[in-house]
Every structure is written in C-alpha cells, then in structure tokens.
Amino acid sequence: MCARKYFALKVLNMDLFEKLEERLAKEYMNYKTRIESENGNKYFVIVNPFWEENIRISAEDGIVFYFSYQHAHFDFYNEFENNVRYLIDYINWFFIGEKVAIEFFCEDESLFGGDRSPEDIDMSSGEALLKGYAGDNDSLYESLYEHLKGFRCRCSIRGWNCALNKDIDFVL
C-alpha cells in the first residue's frame, strides 16, 4: 500500500473512531471508561468492575471488539448507525451474561474460539464442550474431534462477570 493511501486510511479511521467514541461515551456514561493508545491505534475501553478483563473497541479496520480471547469485527464504513447499534447490543450481551468468550487450547497453544451463550456450553466432557461449540454443525464437530483426539486440551470460558469463568481440561 502506498504511503499516501495508508495515511488517508489512518485519517479516515481516526475520524470514524472519534464518531464511535462519542456514541459509545453517551451509551456507557454510567460505566467507567477511558481511551487508550497502543501501537498507533486508539481504543475505547469499558472498565470491568468484576475483574481485570476490560472490553476494548478500536477502529483499526472497521470496528473491532475485544474481550478476553474474543474479538469480533463490525463493518464501520457502511450503515454506521446500524453497525454501532449492533455493537452496543453485542457488548450488552456480555454485560448480562448472555455471551461469554470461549477458547480452546491444545498443549497450551491457542487453537480456536469465539463467543457462545453459556447455556450452550455443556462442561460434562470434552466431547460435550466441542458439541456445544459446534452447535448444529456436525461436520465442524467431527473435524475438531479428529484434530484434537489424543491431545491434552483445555477450554477456557471468560465472562464479563468472573463468576462465569471456567477452565476445563480434557483429553478426547
């Protein structure tokens, strides 16, 4: 990418971040928030009162949501208000415990993860964890099972409220 195009995208992202920051500051005025900068990127941070994992929102390349292991991308350039409304809904799902971050590790290496409803996570066995993660996608479950079979694995679940946090070790 040429320097001129890179600079133009950075300026556009900074302008959009300011617009996003203004919208999120209004929405979360009853929460402790702050702005952080890291590696040239700005983050709108919602401070977690329950433990050290905060929600961070950036405008690196679209809207990017970060919490614990989870990150999610939202289109920033088209239908800004609709996408910000969805982002706010998404954040609120974490606040009320309808969503948690889930990550699978094999031999202490992070492999895959996402967000799930805690109700979909059956922690009775490794097979049940994978089935809950895969949902109705049987081929995903079968593929994950085959790749993880015989290895020492861990599933880490992280919620906004630390009462939802769990680490489950298993071998398939």
Image (spheres, helix red, strand yellow):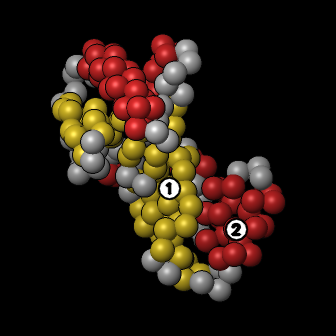
The reply, left or right, for residue 171 in relation to residue 147 is left
Q: Nearer the viewer, residue 168 or 10?
A: 10
- Mark positioned earlier in the residue sequence (1 or 2): 1
Residue extending furthest toward the bottom: 150
**Residue at x 54%, y 51% (from the top left corner):** 114
Above/below status of 9 relative to 19 = below
Under mark 1, the amino acid is Ile
Can I make out residue 17 in this image?
no
Q: Tell me where residue 83 appears, x and y as whole percent.
A: 51, 21
Front one among 96 and 151: 151
What percent of the width, then of the height, locates residue 9?
42, 29
Q: Which mark is residue 102?
A: 1
Give above or below for 81 relative to 3.
above
Circle 2 is placed at which residue position?
A: 144
Q: Secondary structure at mark 1?
A: strand
Residue drawn at x 34%, y 20% as measured from the top left:
15
> Is residue 2 placed above or below 13 in the rendered structure?
below
Marks 1,2: beta carbons within 8 A: no
Res 119 visible: yes
What is the C-alpha distance between the residues marked 1 and 2? Answer: 15 Å
149 with respect to 36 (left or right): right
SS category of the residue bearing label 2:
helix
Going by the numbered disc 2, the residue's amino acid type is: Leu
Q: Quadrant of residue 35?
A: top left
Residue at 39 percent across and 44 percent down: it is: 66
Q: Position of residue 10 (x, y in %)?
A: 37, 31
Residue at the image position 75 percent from the left and 59 percent from the top: 140
Mark 2 packing: few (<14 Cα in 10 Å), some, or many (20+)?
some
Horizontal and vertical percent for residue 167? 43, 67
